[in-house]
Amino acid sequence: MCFLGQQTMPGSVEAEEAPAPPPTVVFRGESSSLKKLLHTLAKTCQVTVGDDSADANVIVCSSQPSGISSLEIEEHLNAGGSLLFLLSGASSSELPAFLRKVVGVTVHDEVVSLSHSTDSLHPRHVVIADDGAVHDDFIDAGVRSIIYPEGTSLNVAKGSSSAVTVISSGSDTFPTNRPLAVAWQHDARSCGGRVVVIGSTAIFSDAFLKAKDNAKLCHTIFQFLLRSSDRVTFSPGRATGVTIDDDNPRPDIAALAHRIKPCLSMLDPLPQDLTELYCDDNLFGFDTDTVTNLYRALEVPREPLKLIQPEFESVMPPLRPAVFAPQIELPPPQIELFNLDEACADRHTKLGQVTNDSLNEGTSAEEFVQRAGAILGVTKDESASAKEILSLIFGRIVQAQARAEDRLPVLHVSTF
């Protein structure tokens, strides 16, 4: 049985029926950072997330390769399915035995980092721009430079003839010329299963899918897995032009820096004349020849410098003697000009004073009500009439009485 690539004979009943359903892609493992990839694949494929991959055309295993067994991989490949492994941070012991023994791919525990400064600000966000570092099928698809973020290198067994290195680290990274992505195809059948192993989980994440040509790289890989294009086969004859180096371990520079070893070589004795240590007479010297040559270069006459008299545009103002003593301390406030009894009196006192003044002076009731309303704060000034003031006061009394009645308890009288 072959999921994709299975063709019907012309004139058969199946050829006249409705077109085949879209292929199914199942994501197993961590997929929270692959939302853009899920959305892109959902346009042409049926995408699901979970462990149910019975009828899947492609299974994507991200971050947790140990979640799928070797038996399940073998059954899926024999049925014509494909698998994509993103193995960033996984150890070789966590890989299924099928990948290690049949495919011949293991994960190296050495991270891939930059060897020099590029447009990438992070040393582990490796930019691969060599044409020989990627497969020719990627170059035909327009892949010129990709970002390989937070990934590790892979080891491919020398006896594995079906495993093809499709992406290598190149010569501008550490380690150099090591496999980063491997493609494998079952050689027993034309529609046998296909496997792609990449040593980085974040290469197709939301942060790096649209960076450089990672989107074209992802599209080409899924064309190979889904067999949607006959031009993408990842044949060994068109593999990367870079010669894969052996796994040579790098020295631990940080550990060697703490193991300082003194040098035991004997030094020559210093000469008595220290001027012999200067290797260039033009570069080192204790004379003023350079300053002397500046007179000639700047055409300045060699003569002692003279004092230049300053010329002020405005003279200083003349001094005038003070004829009066400066007044430093402020005089005390003139409290005697204020009536403190009237200013500090409360409302009751002020109302009593207004009542006494009205009785003694014989003022009208209109003026008395206006002055009392101003003291009580009913009106801001005495411009309101007495009727308006009495109306406002009566309204407030009614409102206060209504609030008091609402707060009284209600007595329920029962009849016997």
Image (spheres, rainbow, N blue to C red):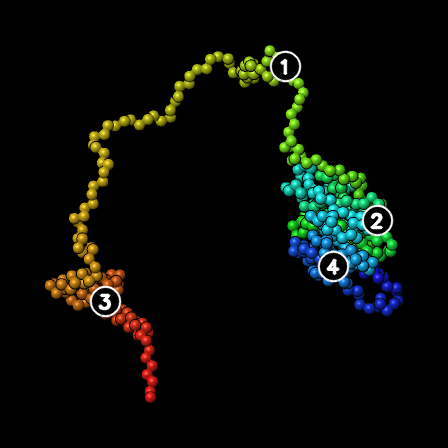
Residue type of the residue flagged with mark 3? Ser
Residue type of the residue flagged with mark 2? Ser
Secondary element at image label 1: loop
Instruction: Residue 341: tell me if it is visible.
Output: yes
Depth check, mark 1 against mark 3: the one in front is 1
Instruction: Name which of mark 3 and mark 2 comes first in the sequence.
Output: 2
Label 4 sits on residue = 25
Q: Residue at x 20, y 55 (%)?
A: 343
Q: Is residue 88 left or right of residue 337?
A: right
Q: Is residue 337 left or right of residue 36?
A: left
Eyeballing the image, is 131 above or below 275? below
Eyeballing the image, is 265 above or below 367? above
Residue type of the residue flagged with mark 4? Val
Q: Residue at x 78, y 55 (%)?
A: 70
Q: Position of residue 299 (x, y in %)?
A: 54, 16
Label 1 sits on residue = 269
Q: CA distance from mark 1 to mark 3?
A: 115 Å
Instruction: Name which of mark 4 and mark 1 comes first in the sequence.
Output: 4
Marks 1,2: beta carbons within 8 A: no
Depth check, mark 2 against mark 4: the one in front is 2
Front-most of 332 and 378?
A: 332
Which residue is situated farthest in the top direction here?
Answer: 272
Residue type of the residue flagged with mark 1? Pro
Instruction: Name which of mark 1 and mark 2 comes first in the sequence.
Output: 2
Q: CA distance from mark 3 to mark 2?
A: 108 Å
**Where, by quadrant of the figure, is residue 375 drawn?**
bottom left
Quadrant occupied by the C terminus: bottom left
Eyeballing the image, is 412 above or below 318? below
Depth check, mark 3 against mark 2: the one in front is 2
Label 2 sits on residue = 162
Q: Position of residue 212 (x, y in %)?
A: 69, 46
Label 3 sits on residue = 385
